[in-house]
Amino acid sequence: MYSHRMTNSKPTTHRHREATRIILRPIGSGLPLGLFALAIGTLLTGGAAFGIIPTSEIQQVGLMLVLFAFPLELLAAILAFMARDTMSATAFALFSASWLSIGMGLRLSEPGSTSAAVGMFELGVAISVAVLAVLAAKAKPYITILMGLSALRLAAHGIYELTSIQAWYTAVGVIAVLIVIGSLYGATAFILEDMHQREVLPLFRKRHAEEAFHGFEHQLDRLEAEPGIRQQL
């Protein structure tokens, strides 16, 4: 547990400022778990798009997404929120809810059928994930690439659901391969960082994301204004 003493550069007669403490509880990173779950969930959808998983088994894919990908992504999102990583937490929460929704849709629909409702839903999630990708560009290029690919996969699948054009479903499979590779790379990189307490495989962090690895002194100046510490969000 880490305690930070609140300070104020301006002269003040408020003695409570000197007595205020901020307590942070160290937790394990949820990023490897979330990325492994993303890789496996995407592998299932990519396998269905390529025909490796036959249409007759598509309902089993839906069940696996609900029982495996959904809860693990949700757990990763909760851990990320606890670690004050709002962007990663939001992304994992969106993926978690989408796996649950899509998985239930596959379980309840006729194998091989398409749905305009699912298509619109996936386009909506794709737009949200794309926004996160753009916001991460200045500090986390790896996250930008992975979120960008995920947004493309969701958009391609959404268009397929709306149009039933097979070429879009094939595109889903191609993009899924890239996401699986990228997710496995990132999960491995984050685990190695946790083991060695330093960057082993490059994730190309910049600005505040890079400063986070340089110790407390680089982060304390902005700590008091972060969510969960400031009075209002």
Image (cartoon, rainbow, N blue to C red):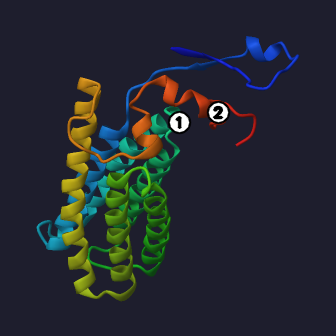
Q: Is residue 141 above or below residue 123?
A: above
- Give the total of numbered labels: 2
Tell me the residue that label 2 is attached to.
228
Left/right of residue 49 with respect to residue 14 in the rendered view: left
Amino acid type, label 1: Arg
The answer to whether the residues at label 2 and label 1 have Cβ atoms under 8 Å apart is yes
| Image point (27%, 55%), residue name | 41
Q: Position of residue 63 (x, y in %)?
A: 30, 54
Q: Is residue 190 above or below residue 204?
A: above
Tell me the residue that label 1 is attached to.
84
Q: Determine which of the numbered discs, if any, sits on residue 232 in the image.
A: none
Q: CA distance from mark 2 to mark 1?
A: 8 Å
| Image point (74%, 24%), residue name | 8
Q: Position of residue 32 (x, y in %)?
A: 30, 39
| Image point (52%, 32%), residue name | 82
Numbered disc 2: secondary structure: loop
- Dividing the picture into quadrants, the one containing residue 61 is bottom left
View extreme (left): residue: 52
Numbered disc 1: secondary structure: loop
Most foreground residue, 75 or 174: 174
Q: The C terminus appears in which quarter of the rendering? A: top right
**Residue 233, visible in the rendered structure:** yes
Left/right of residue 72 with respect to residue 123 in the rendered view: left
Q: Is residue 157 above or below residue 27?
A: below
Amino acid type, label 2: Gly
Q: Position of residue 102 (x, y in %)?
A: 39, 63
